Image: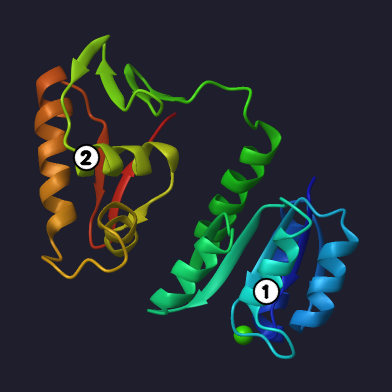
Amino acid sequence: MSKILIIEDEANIARFIELELKHEGNEVDKALDGRTGLDMALAGGYDLILLDVMLPVLNGLEVLRRIRLESEVPVIMLTARDAVMDKVSGLDAGADDYITKPFAIEELLARIRVALKKRVAPTVQSNKLQIGNVVLDEDRHEVTVNGENVELSNREFELLHTLMKNKNIVMDRDKLMNMVCGYDYMGETNIIDVYIRYLRTKIDDKFGIKLITTVRGVGYIIKED
Ligand code: CA
């Protein structure tokens, strides 16, 4: 069971998230403005904080900055659709993740699980991600399959890294594009599909495995049973 704080001024959204989180067995508190939320967050005891950006009294980014002066508690920002600046500022200010409204509750729950897991198992682990026989070494910037080295470009590596880090979560194209190409990328919108094709040629096809799954109309996922 985790103790989660929701700082969100839209009462019906806050209530909806609260019910879902309680249903999953978590303890949940709510704050409807930034100032109250900040005070509650700093009083401590939370395993995770969900923080809306547009808040009365004190906005979400300011709340986050002040939390980060004192605490490393995982924070997931709730941002408005297409508010790219919010996402960038949020991540810069130390948010662990963000989710765009409106969101599917399953995605939010999945992101919360990831953020909580990071907190439970920090630092001690080596910086390697493994799915089946595919191993990605963050420190050495290296990917191997069955122990055999796979040559990847920087963006292919970043894309694979993002998918492996978020395994079992569907990553939509926009999010992948932001993470792999940067927020200011203005080029082809199908660039992610192109890199996915390269990755499949170099990994799936070459080694006869099914690593990356397409979720039609949404994006991509790497699943681990
Ligand atoms: Ca709001």
Q: Give the Cα separation between the discs numbered 1 and 2.
A: 40 Å
Disc 1 vs disc 2: Cβ atoms closer than 8 Å?
no
Name the side, left or right, on which 54 lies relative to 175: right
> At which x and y percent is residue 126?
52, 21
> At which x and y percent is residue 5?
77, 64
Tell me the quarter of the picture where residue 153 sits: top left
Residue extending farthest to the top is 147
Q: Is residue 170 above or below residue 217?
A: above
- At label 2, the amino acid type is Asn
Name the side, left or right, on which 166 lies relative to 93: left
Q: Is residue 4 above or below residue 203?
A: below
1 or 2: mark nearer the eye: 2
- The residue carrying mark 2 is 154
> At which x and y percent is residue 130?
41, 23
- At label 1, the amino acid type is Phe
Residue extending farthest to the front is 69
Labels 1 and 2: the sequence-earlier one: 1
Report whether residue 83 is seen.
Answer: yes
**Secondary element at tag 1:** helix
